[in-house]
Image (tube, helix red, strand yellow):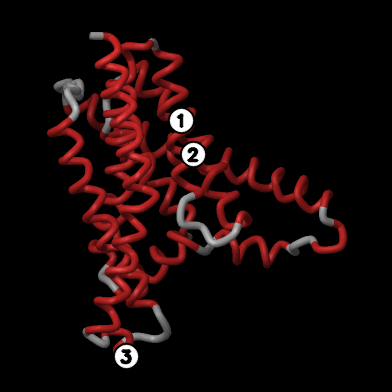
């Protein structure tokens, strides 16, 4: 019975990583074909529309993948009825948590830049170059989304994308792996969340900031969820974190 459960956990872990490694890559290629087929890029400057379509399709696939996991994986997400006062408190808590994680991540990113530059005296990046790198990847897509879509649609897409990550890496993984103890569940959730950030990056410099942010956020959010198993404040914190990253 135990070996069967371990097998199921291993399969679940590999399915999640496979989706983030290969499933998203297929969606990205599909979004590029859609953009070219319908010649949508001619209505917008550069490749902005391609990035927006890619982001929207990825966010939709995140939600679909979440629903499939919740259907397949025998995990129960804890539910707690809150009073209006408690709801407001948790709302504020989510926003402040996101701002705090963003501040700590920015500090560690600055330290990482200094360490990397100390080893690369002859080929170090200036601050402008690092900022350009930091605004690549998904940050760039969200900036494109804000420019093209109404702000409420941009927020919906953002919430779909990062909210699904909270459900997968905190709600599902922490609850599902808890049979091996809190520390194993914590490490599995955190390490996979960090690893996922490196997928689909074309250079190691582009992966540094997302992985640092994931390490800080994953560490704090996992502890928060283990102690207070309510997901929606963590989703708000994740959205807040991303908003401050974009602006």
Q: Does residue 115 appear left or right of residue 241 in this picture?
A: right
Q: CA distance from mark 3 to mark 2?
A: 36 Å
Residue 92 in view of the camera: no
Q: Residue at x 49, y 54 (%)?
A: 245
Element under disc 1: helix
Q: CA distance from mark 2 to mark 1?
A: 6 Å
Q: Position of residue 229 (x, y in %)?
A: 29, 21
Element under disc 2: helix
**What number is the disc on residue 93?**
none
Q: Position of residue 35 (x, y in %)?
A: 28, 79
Element under disc 3: helix
Q: Does residue 133 appear left or right of residue 125 in this picture?
A: left
Q: Residue at x 63, y 56 (%)?
A: 205
* Neighbours of disc 1 within 10 Å: few (<14), some (14-19), many (20+): many
Q: Nearer the viewer, residue 17 or 218?
A: 17
**Residue receiving disc 2:** 194
Q: Do the residues under discs 3 and 2 have CB atoms within 8 angstroms?
A: no
Give the mark nearer the N terminus: 1 vs 3.
3
Q: Quadrant of residue 34?
A: bottom left
158 vs 35: above or below: above
Residue 168 in view of the camera: yes
**Residue receiving disc 1:** 190
Give the mark nearer the N terminus: 3 vs 2.
3
Q: Position of residue 32 (x, y in %)?
A: 32, 74
* Neighbours of disc 3 within 10 Å: few (<14), some (14-19), many (20+): few
Q: Do the residues under discs 2 and 1 have CB atoms within 8 angstroms?
A: yes
Q: Position of residue 139 (x, y in %)?
A: 45, 60
**What number is the disc on residue 42?**
3
Q: Quadrant of residue 65?
A: top left
């Amino acid at each position: 019975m135990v070996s069967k459960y371990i097998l199921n956990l291993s399969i679940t872990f590999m399915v999640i990583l496979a989706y983030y490694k290969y499933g998203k890559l297929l969606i990205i290629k599909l979004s590029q074909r859609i953009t070219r087929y319908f010649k949508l890029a001619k209505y917008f400057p550069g490749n902005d529309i391609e990035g927006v379509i890619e982001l929207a399709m990825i966010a939709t696939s995140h939600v679909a993948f979440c629903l499939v996991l919740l259907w397949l994986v025998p995990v129960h997400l804890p539910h707690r009825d809150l009073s209006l006062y408690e709801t407001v408190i948790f709302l504020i808590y989510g926003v402040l948590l996101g701002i705090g994680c963003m501040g700590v991540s920015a500090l560690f990113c600055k330290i990482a830049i200094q360490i990397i530059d100390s080893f690369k005296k002859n080929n170090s990046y200036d601050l402008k170059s690092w900022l350009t790198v930091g605004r690549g990847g998904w940050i760039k897509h969200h900036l494109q989304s804000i420019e093209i879509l109404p702000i409420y649609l941009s927020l919906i897409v953002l919430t779909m994308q990062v909210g699904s990550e909270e459900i997968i890496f905190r709600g599902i993984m922490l609850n599902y792996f808890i049979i091996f103890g809190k520390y194993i569940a914590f490490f599995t959730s955190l390490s996979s969340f960090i690893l996922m950030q490196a997928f689909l990056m074309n250079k190691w410099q582009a992966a540094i900031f997302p992985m640092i942010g994931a390490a800080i956020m994953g560490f704090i959010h996992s502890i928060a969820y283990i102690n207070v198993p309510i997901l929606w404040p963590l989703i708000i914190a994740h959205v807040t974190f991303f908003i401050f990253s974009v602006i």
